[in-house]
Image (tube, rainbow, N blue to C red):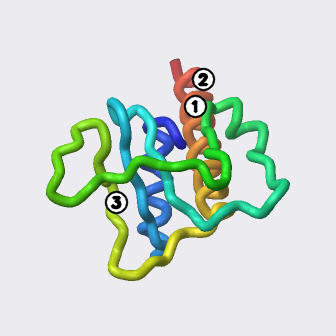
Amino acid sequence: MIPEPLASAVVHGLISALQPAVVLSTGRGERLTFLTVARPPGTVLPGDLDRAHIRTLPMGRAVVLPVPGRSMPDCRWVVPPGRTAVLPHWSVVVALARRALQAAQANVTVQRTAG
């Protein structure tokens, strides 16, 4: 689960790199959930992402998915699954999240020095 606006940058990165993206929004849309290939056992989320409030769901945890034809205002597809059952690799989403976080941090630093 990745908070906005970092999540939008990750979606854009996946699409720009022609990677599959399957993303849903739950609740008020403050965080987006990226469905990925399962992360390798024992893999830990990097500390900088953890400090940015990016979270991984435990392997095997149930995720509520939107149901076609049913109104579910608290659960909607941001990028619905395509016709193929391909998901991005966990490491690709993590790498894009790190890039988005670094860009956001660099932007804050530039704004502070310019102000």
Q: Residue furthest top?
A: 115
Sequence-first disc among 3 and 2? 3
Q: Mark 3 = which residue?
A: 79
- Identify the amino acid type marked 2: Thr
Residue at 35% over, 32% down: 27
The tag on residue 113 is 2
**Nearest the camera: 96 or 77?**
77
Q: How far apart are the two marked residues, 3 and 1, measured between alpha carbons? A: 32 Å
Report x, y in % for residue 10: 50, 54
Report x, y in % for residue 16: 44, 69
Identify the secondary structure beneath mark 1: helix
* Position of the N terminus by quadrant: top right
Q: Nearer the viewer, mark 3 or mark 2?
A: 3
**Nearest the camera: 14 or 57?**
57
Report x, y in % for residue 18: 46, 76
Residue at 33% over, 80% down: 83
**Nearest the camera: 109 or 50?**
50
Residue at 42% over, 62% down: 22
Please tell me in which quadrant of the rendered image residue 39 appears: bottom right
The answer to whether 70 is drawn above or below residue 80 in the figure is above
Report x, y in % for residue 103: 58, 44
Query: Does residue 73 appear to the left or right of 51 in the view shown?
Result: left
Q: How far apart are the two marked residues, 3 and 2, measured between alpha carbons? A: 37 Å
The answer to whether 4 is drawn above or below residue 35 in the figure is above
Query: Does residue 92 appear to the left or right of 32 in the view shown?
Result: right
Identify the secondary structure beneath mark 3: strand
Query: Does residue 62 appear to the left or right of 29 in the view shown?
Result: right
Q: Mark 1 = which residue?
A: 110
- Identify the amino acid type marked 1: Val
Q: Nearer the viewer, mark 3 or mark 1?
A: 3
Cβ–Cβ under 8 Å for marks 3 and 1: no
